[in-house]
Image: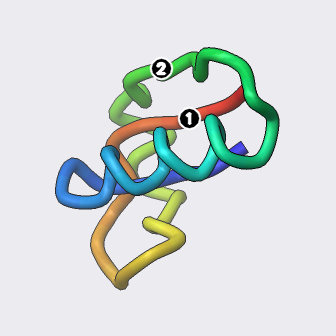
Amino acid sequence: MIYCCKEHVEIALDTIVDEYETAPVMKELSEEEKLSTGCEYCENKAAYLVAN
């Protein structure tokens, strides 16, 4: 699972495809989840959860 901001969502999608060789699932985070979760690629707040 990768938490990412809107800027890095394409990188997260590519990472899941490369690692698991399956179509990724992308979920938009709720407002509560956005407040407590940061992007794994930068210091912005996460907007999406990308998983296999």
What residue did someone put label 2 on? Answer: 27
**Residue 24: percent from the left, percent from the top?**
59, 22
Residue beneath the point at 18% across and 58% down: 7
Element assignment for label 2: strand
Residue 15 bears which disc, if any? none
Q: Which residue lies furthest to the right in this view?
A: 20
N-terminal of the two: label 1 or label 2?
Answer: 2
**Residue 27: percent from the left, percent from the top?**
47, 20
Residue beneath the point at 57% across and 17% down: 25
Q: How is the image coloured?
A: rainbow
Could you tell me how far apart the alpha carbons at marks 1 and 2 are, in whole angstroms?
6 Å
Q: Residues within 10 Å of mark 1 (few under 14, many from 20)?
A: many
Quadrant of the image containing the C terminus: top right
**Residue 46: percent from the left, percent from the top?**
39, 54
Residue 8, compared with residue 10, is above or below; it is below
Give 8 or 44, whichever is nearer the viewer.
8
Q: How crowded is mark 2: few (under 14 residues within 10 Å), some or many (20 or more)?
A: few
Indicate the quadrant where residue 39 lies: bottom left
Q: Which amino acid does label 1 sit on?
A: Val
Q: Which residue lies furthest to the left in this view?
A: 7
Residue beneath the point at 66% across and 46% down: 18
Give 21 or 24, whichever is nearer the viewer.
21
Q: Pointer 1 and pointer 2: residues touching (CB < 8 Å)?
A: yes
What residue did someone put label 1 on? Answer: 50
Q: How many labels does the image show?
A: 2
Element assignment for label 1: strand
Indicate the quadrant where residue 29 lies: top left
Residue beneath the point at 30% across and 59% down: 8
Q: Which amino acid does label 2 sit on?
A: Lys
Give 9 or 33, whichever is nearer the viewer.
9
Give 22 or 26, whichever is nearer the viewer.
22
**Residue 19 appears left or right of 35:** right
